Structures are given as structure tokens and as C-alpha cells.
């Protein structure tokens, strides 16, 4: 049995996060202004830098969104041993099409989900069925909407990233990503893709330990054993 320790961070806060507006995979707002970190987000990054100072990792994976870049780059400057930083679009946030730029409270939520759960588990954000309120048929595409990503495609790229993480046997990996993509990645890491989501505050830290049998078959990922060390850890920001 080989062990892998995966630490996963949700990026720090952006102005749209604070206004409770769905950002999706966009790097600019509806006015075309780049969506970097807010003042609160920059403060959160400072706390993350203090937390990770002199910690060592074999590799760091991070999405390519601006908000992720502004979160991971300061952390990289304080890690022990200068591990490689892999900028990987597979860690990017899910594109949610017509929901981009929509305030949370305009989205009808059912089945005991929250907004993150809804955007995680909806199969096709572009599906509009007037007979089904859960499709939020009153929300129409705008010039800002952009493309959307079907859930199966999001899961496929998360699995692809997961199998790359497994290459770091007996290693420690840091991943910086976004909320909906984290939910899918966590489900894969823990062999649990039930309709559950884990709260993820901006700048929070999660840690999962994986036990990989020496005869691990990538076609049967449930062979891996996992233990959640902690979820949504935010004590470093108090």
C-alpha cells in the first residue's frame, strides 16, 4: 500500500463571491473587467501564505483562472524545496452557461440542494424545460453567458486529474481549484459521488489521505482507500 496526501484549497474571495453572484468559469465580469481577488481575498491569501510557510509538497496543481493564479502564486514563494507548479485547466471551474452572472437568489433550488449542489449535479446547464422548475427555465442566456459544460465532461476531466495525482506515490500534493470542481474531485477521491456537497469557504483547506494498493487498476478506482483528515478548515483565517 502506497500513501498519497492530497491537500486541496478553494481559491480566495472575489468581488462576485462576496456579492453572491455565480462566476462559473469566467475571468471577467459582465462589464469586461477582470475578476481578480477582492481585498478580503488578498487578506485570505496572506493567511494561506502564513499557514503553508516552509511546508513541502512534491507537486502543486492549480487551475488557470486569474483568481486561482492570485491564490497559488504567493503560496509558491514560501513552500519548502520549490516544488513544480502545474497549471492545469482540468482544475478549472465548471462552465455553467446561462447561470453565469446570475445572483444566487434568482436560482430555484430543490431536492434539498444548495446553490453549489445545484451547479454540481445539474446534468446540462443549457437544458430548459418549462415543465420542470429545477431547470430554471426563466433564466435565459445573455451575451455574458458563454458556453456550458455537461456534468459528465466535468467528471471525466476530474478523473483524468485524479489519475495524474496517483502518479505521486508516497507523495504530498497541493491542488488549488474552485468550488464546483472541488465537489466532483472530492467525490472521486473518497469514492462517494452521492448528491452531497461539502461546504467550501473561500481560502479554506481540505486534506485527504489516499491508500493505493500496489496492484491498483485505474479502471477500478474504488480499489483506492481514502481518509478525510479535514474539510473546510478555516482556523488559519481567525
Image (spheres, helix red, strand yellow):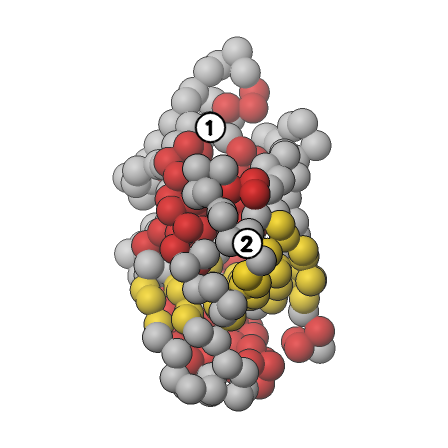
Q: Position of residue 101 (x, y in %)?
A: 42, 46
Q: On screen, 81 above or below 232?
A: below
Residue 123: mark in rendering = 1
Q: On screen, 237 above or below 134?
A: below
Pointer 2 residue: 212
For the N terminus, the image quarter is bottom right
Q: How many marks?
A: 2
Quick check: marks 1 and 2 in contact, CB under 8 Å? Answer: no
Q: On screen, 210 above or below 116?
A: below
The answer to whether residue 156 is visible is yes
Q: On screen, 27 above or below 107?
A: below
Look at the numbered disc 1 and give the secondary structure of its residue: loop
Look at the numbered disc 2 and give the secondary structure of its residue: strand
Residue that appears at 30% across and 38% down: 147
- 220 to the left or right of 231: left
- The mark lying in front, picked from 1 and 2, is 2
Amino acid at each position: 500500500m502506497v500513501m498519497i496526501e492530497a491537500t486541496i484549497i478553494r481559491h480566495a474571495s472575489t468581488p462576485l463571491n462576496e456579492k453572491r453572484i455565480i462566476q462559473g468559469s469566467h475571468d471577467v465580469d459582465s462589464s469586461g473587467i477582470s475578476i481578480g481577488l477582492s481585498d478580503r481575498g488578498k487578506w485570505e491569501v496572506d493567511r494561506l501564505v502564513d499557514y503553508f510557510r516552509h511546508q513541502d509538497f512534491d507537486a502543486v496543481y492549480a487551475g488557470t483562472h486569474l483568481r486561482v493564479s492570485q491564490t497559488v502564486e504567493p503560496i509558491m514563494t514560501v513552500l519548502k524545496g520549490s516544488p513544480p507548479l502545474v497549471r492545469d485547466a482540468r482544475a478549472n471551474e465548471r462552465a455553467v452557461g446561462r447561470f453565469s452572472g446570475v445572483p444566487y437568489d434568482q436560482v430555484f433550488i430543490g431536492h434539498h440542494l444548495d446553490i453549489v449542489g445545484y451547479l454540481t449535479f445539474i446534468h446540462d446547464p443549457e437544458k430548459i424545460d418549462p415543465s420542470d422548475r429545477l431547470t430554471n427555465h426563466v433564466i435565459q442566456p445573455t451575451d455574458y453567458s458563454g458556453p456550458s459544460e455537461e456534468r459528465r465532461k466535468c467528471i471525466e476531466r476530474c478523473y483524468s486529474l485524479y489519475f495524474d495525482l496517483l502518479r505521486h506515490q508516497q507523495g504530498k500534493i497541493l491542488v488549488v481549484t474552485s468550488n464546483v470542481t472541488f465537489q466532483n474531485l472530492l467525490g472521486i477521491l473518497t469514492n462517494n459521488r452521492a448528491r452531497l456537497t461539502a461546504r467550501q469557504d473561500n481560502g479554506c483547506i481540505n486534506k485527504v489521505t489516499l491508500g493505493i494498493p500496489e496492484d491498483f487498476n485505474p479502471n477500478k478506482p474504488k480499489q483506492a482507500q481514502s481518509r478525510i483528515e479535514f474539510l473546510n478548515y478555516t482556523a488559519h483565517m481567525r
